[in-house]
């Protein structure tokens, strides 16, 4: 199978491209940079620079490669920066127009498309896990609205789609909460972490395996995917990071209001119901505690 993967300079796209190449698929990956600038890729992965906001460029690249599937991992993910008025058009261009360009190019060549989305499409109210087919959308910030509108652009352009919402991603190829907490924990005796935002971490490598499994099927629709292991707060996640890495840094729980600082509002309830995965024959992701242990070993912590 020929698969085109966007955003391979990032956490998930990098893992997806490598896993699919290891499975023997023909892989072409893209990023905005002229040359690939992440960790070492599988030598079988071809890289092409692509600005997904340029419709003619997208049509040319997809038209030349003629993939059987596109896995769209590229996105504007700087949540706080997205709130700045000067960035609004750029955020929309990447997350909405870029997705629309890819979806229409997929539809033109008959390719299926998988779009990586986020828990931020919901408003984070209540305590019940959000179901994959819930359409009670009310994003709290510009980033969440742009990802929701990207979902809508995909669904409007093709019927051969997967929308996979995830949360709290950490991986080797990029920055994330785990790396930040490890860095801070080595230089500070105390760290303040919010305790009233609840969700589940997601290891990029485990998620990528699922996305690869999914795109090898025609089981289209909306899905939620994080690691298993229950719902926790960022505070509890940080405590486990330090426990497993052997750091003695004190972790102080604070509310979102007490923490302050963030330009963008965050959802308090990021619990995602993942029951559609086994219902459709997909293996759930491993426990997040196990995923964290594997990740820390991989990055040498």
Image (spheres, helix red, strand yellow):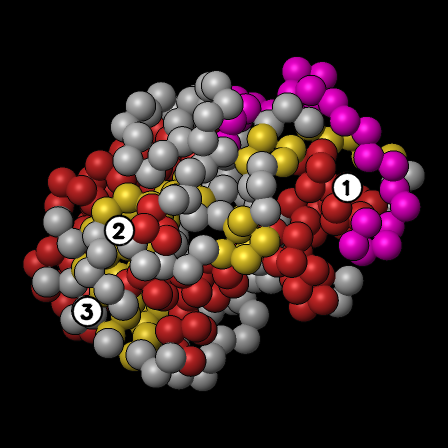
x and y percentages locating residue 130 in the rendered image: 40, 31
Classify mark 2: helix, strand or loop: strand
1 or 3: tag closer to the N-terminus: 3
Q: Residues within 10 Å of mark 3 (few under 14, many from 20)?
A: some
* Horizontal arrangement in the rendering, residue 131 relative to residue 59 (left or right): right
Instruction: Give 149 or 55, whichever is nearer the viewer.
Output: 149
Q: Distance between the residues labelled 2 and 3?
A: 14 Å
> Residue under circle 1?
239
> Residue under circle 3?
68
The number of numbered discs placed on residues in the rendered structure image is: 3
Residue 241 visible in the displayed image: yes
Q: Is residue 35 depicted above or below 165 in this figure?
A: below
Check if mark 1's residue and mark 2's residue have beta carbons within 8 Å.
no
Residue 10 visible in the displayed image: no
Q: Distance between the residues labelled 1 and 3?
A: 43 Å
Instruction: Give 157 or 198, whichever is nearer the viewer.
Output: 198
> Residue under circle 2?
162
Q: In which quarter of the image is the C terminus?
A: bottom right
Classify mark 3: helix, strand or loop: loop
Magenta stretch: includes residue 72:
no
Q: Which of marks 2 and 3 is in front?
A: 2
| Residue at image coords 32%, 75% | 27
| Residue at image coords 66%, 64% | 294
* Horizontal arrangement in the rendering, residue 69 relative to residue 144 (left or right): left
């Amino acid at each position: 199978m020929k698969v085109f993967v966007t955003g391979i300079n990032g956490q998930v796209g990098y893992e997806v491209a490598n896993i699919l190449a290891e499975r023997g698929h023909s892989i072409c990956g893209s990023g905005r940079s002229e040359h690939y600038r992440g960790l070492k890729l599988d030598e079988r992965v071809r890289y092409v620079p692509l600005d997904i906001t340029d419709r003619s460029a997208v049509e040319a690249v997809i038209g030349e490669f003629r993939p059987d599937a596109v896995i769209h991992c590229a996105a504007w993910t700087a949540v706080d920066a997205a709130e700045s008025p000067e960035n609004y058009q750029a955020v929309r261009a990447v997350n909405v127009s870029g997705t629309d360009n890819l979806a229409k190019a997929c539809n033109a060549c008959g390719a299926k498309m998988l779009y990586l989305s986020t828990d931020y499409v919901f408003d984070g109210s209540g305590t019940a896990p959000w179901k994959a087919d819930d359409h009670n959308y009310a994003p709290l910030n510009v980033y969440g609205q742009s990802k929701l509108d990207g979902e809508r652009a995909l669904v409007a352009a093709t019927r051969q789609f997967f929308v996979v919402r995830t949360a709290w991603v950490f991986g080797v190829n990029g920055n994330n909460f785990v790396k930040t907490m490890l860095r801070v924990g080595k230089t500070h005796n105390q760290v303040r972490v919010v305790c009233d935002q609840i969700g589940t971490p997601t290891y990029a490598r485990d998620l990528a395996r699922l996305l690869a499994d999914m795109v090898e099927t025609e089981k289209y629709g909306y899905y939620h995917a994080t690691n298993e292991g229950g719902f926790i707060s960022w505070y509890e996640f940080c405590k486990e990071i330090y426990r497993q890495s052997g750091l003695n840094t004190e972790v102080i729980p604070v509310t979102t209001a007490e923490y302050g600082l963030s330009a963008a509002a965050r959802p308090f309830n990021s619990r995602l119901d993942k029951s559609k995965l086994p219902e459709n024959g997909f293996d759930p992701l491993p426990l997040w505690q196990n995923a964290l242990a594997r990740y820390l070993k991989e990055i040498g912590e």
